[in-house]
Image (cartoon, helix red, strand yellow):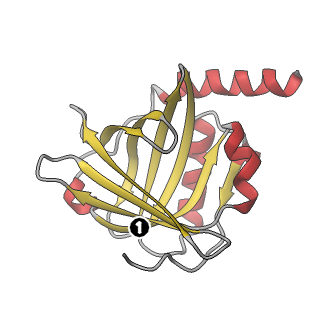
Amino acid sequence: MRNTLMMLVALMCALTVCADITPAADFDLQKMSGKWYTVALASNAQWFVNTKAGMKTGTAVIVLTEGGDMDLTFANLKDDGSCFRATHTAQKTETPGRFTFHSQVGNNDNDLTVVEVVYDDYALVLIIKTKEEVSEAFVEVYSRTPEFSEVVQQKFTQLALEAGVLPDNAVILPQIAECPAV
């Protein structure tokens, strides 16, 4: 019961605080396009807490569409050698650096905000996933290489805390081979 109460308090804090987190200034999707590595994740979502120990680095490829939206393709090599792949088209909003999309995989609605980005190095991304009126915050670090600096790790930790994520629920993902190109 106490754990449930703690998670509820953390979620309420996350939803309140996340409203104050804004996109990166002068966001440029064209510069954001290309291949990224997902190197760190944080969330209080129960499924994430239960599976985070087995998660590993994956890739994300961002492509600017003709209409100014963002095609986002994720790939993660699974333990059995197969690849998990998911593609979403995130629609731009009136706020540069903020996108929305529905995930068929998770059957949830997603509000994605690029909070900070150095286009040739890293991006800090906040995603609010909502399913059946329950919202959960996810903080992700995308890096142009499989490694990222201590400074970026500190920024990730700070953003996760600002989003209401409990410190134990933030993970630096171990490196693994990439999925083969399709």
Quarter of the image with the N terminus is top right
Look at 45% across and 48% down and name the residue there. Answer: 125
**Residue 129 image offset from top left, x and y in percent:** 50, 34
Look at 52% across and 40% down and name the residue there. Answer: 106
Q: Amino acid at mark 1?
A: Trp
**Among the 4 quarters of the image, the one containing residue 63:** bottom left
**Among the 4 quarters of the image, the one containing residue 175:** bottom right
Look at 54% across and 26% down and name the residue there. Answer: 17
Quarter of the image with the C terminus is bottom left
**Residue 53 image offset from top left, x and y in percent:** 75, 58
**Residue 68 image offset from top left, x and y in percent:** 16, 47
| For residue 68, above or below residue 178 | above
Q: Is residue 34 left or right of residue 146?
A: left
Exactly how many numbered labels are in the figure?
1
| For residue 97, above or below residue 180 | above
Count residues near mark 1 (Cα–Cα under 10 Å), then give few for <14, some for 14-19, many for 20+.
Answer: many
Q: Is residue 29 left or right of residue 44?
A: left
75 and 94: which one is in front?
75
Q: Is residue 45 left or right of residue 17?
A: right
**Residue 11 image offset from top left, x and y in percent:** 64, 26
Look at 26% across and 40% down and name the residue there. Answer: 91
Mark 1 lies on a secondary structure that is strand
Residue on which disc 1 sits: 36
| For residue 163, above or below residue 174 | above
